[in-house]
Image: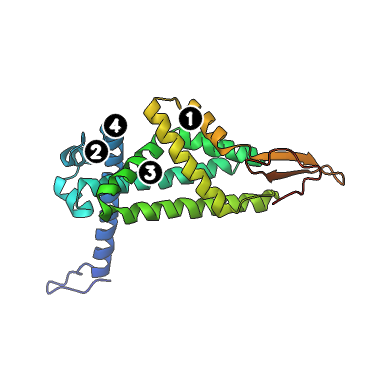
């Protein structure tokens, strides 16, 4: 309870007031990021003003500079947040896969269905001129890799897949190729379906299945780009 004032009324609990202020601040930041993401994707960095973003979020321009300092910092944070949201959606889509091939297809289809990767790529290039913004991008990339590796390792363990690459290597390879293919796809005006096919080609053959001679279970494994032929016993790895 709050302390009593001279008039006998209970004063607000300072801790409650701090929590309320922090909650309101997080909500406002989220609203500004939502508005900024939408406008930046539609108009680009140069075509979007701080006033535009404030109006779209029903906020004041001063609130943007208070929470983010500059429009460029807001751009990078919005792109990084969207990228992590996409990574989470990608992992959720891939959870339904029962084979490595299905897993790879789910990843490719999800990341090429939106313009989020292209948005994030713009943030990557922006940090070339604004090195003060690079740490946020670096942390985002590391989270992409670590969370992707965790999700993939879970699927490998769950289904008993055999893998030629460690989960960390697989995750880094996927995101590096995906970013390159999607940036090129947007530059060339390719449709999402075309980018998905190109991404799958770039990733290479991902899985083979063979029947075990001792039971009816199908053994699955990931294969490298130079190792696409099915093995005879389902146990080959390198």
Which image quarter holds the N terminus?
Answer: bottom left
Residue at the disc numbered 1: 195
Q: Are marks 4 and 2 in contact (CB under 8 Å)?
A: no
**First-in-chain label (1 vs 3):** 3
Please say if 193 is above or below 136.
Answer: above
Q: Which mark is residue 42?
A: 4
The answer to whether any part of residue 89 appears in the image is no
Q: Are marks 1 and 3 in contact (CB under 8 Å)?
A: no
Q: Residues within 10 Å of mark 1 (few under 14, many from 20)?
A: many
**Identity of the residue drawn at 44% across and 25% down:** 191
Per the image, label 4 sits on a secondary structure element best described as helix
Per the image, label 3 sits on a secondary structure element best described as helix
Question: Which of the two marks, 4 or 2, is nearer to us in this view?
Answer: 2
Q: Are marks 2 and 3 in contact (CB under 8 Å)?
A: no
**Residue farthest to the left, as pictured:** 6
Residue 136 in percent (x, y) is at 33, 54
Q: Which mark is residue 159?
A: none
**Residue farthest to the right, as pictured:** 214
**First-in-chain label (2 vs 3):** 2
Q: Nearer the viewer, residue 169 or 105?
A: 169
Per the image, label 2 sits on a secondary structure element best described as loop
* Real-space Cα separation, disc 3 to disc 4, in angstroms: 14 Å
Residue 87 in percent (x, y) is at 47, 45
Question: Which of the two marks, 1 or 4, is nearer to us in this view?
Answer: 1
Residue at the disc numbered 3: 82
**Identity of the residue drawn at 50% across and 49% down:** 172
**First-in-chain label (1 vs 4):** 4
**First-in-chain label (2 vs 1):** 2
Residue at the disc numbered 2: 45
Please say if 7 is above or below 208.
Answer: below
Q: Residues within 10 Å of mark 2 (few under 14, many from 20)?
A: some
């Amino acid at each position: 309870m709050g302390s009593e004032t001279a008039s006998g009324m209970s004063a607000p609990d300072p801790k409650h007031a701090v929590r309320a202020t922090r909650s309101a601040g997080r909500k406002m930041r989220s609203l500004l990021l939502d508005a900024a993401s939408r406008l930046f994707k539609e108009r680009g960095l140069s075509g979007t003003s701080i006033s535009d973003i404030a109006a779209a979020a029903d906020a004041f321009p001063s609130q943007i500079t208070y929470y983010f300092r500059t429009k460029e910092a807001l751009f990078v944070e919005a792109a990084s947040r969207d990228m992590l949201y996409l990574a989470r959606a990608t992992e959720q889509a891939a959870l339904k896969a029962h084979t490595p091939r299905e897993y790879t297809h789910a990843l490719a289809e999800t990341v090429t269905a939106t313009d989020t990767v292209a948005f994030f790529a713009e943030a990557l290039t922006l940090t070339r001129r604004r090195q003060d913004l690079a740490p946020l991008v670096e942390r985002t990339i590391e989270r992409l890799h670590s969370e992707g590796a965790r999700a993939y390792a879970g699927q490998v363990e769950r289904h008993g897949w055999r893998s030629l690459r460690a989960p960390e290597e697989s995750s880094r390879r996927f995101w590096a190729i995906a970013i390159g293919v999607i940036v090129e796809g947007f530059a060339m005006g390719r449709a999402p379906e075309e980018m998905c096919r190109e991404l799958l080609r770039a990733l290479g053959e991902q899985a083979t299945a063979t029947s075990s001679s001792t039971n009816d279970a199908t053994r699955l494994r990931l294969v490298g780009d130079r190792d696409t032929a099915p093995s005879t016993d389902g146990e080959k790895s390198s």
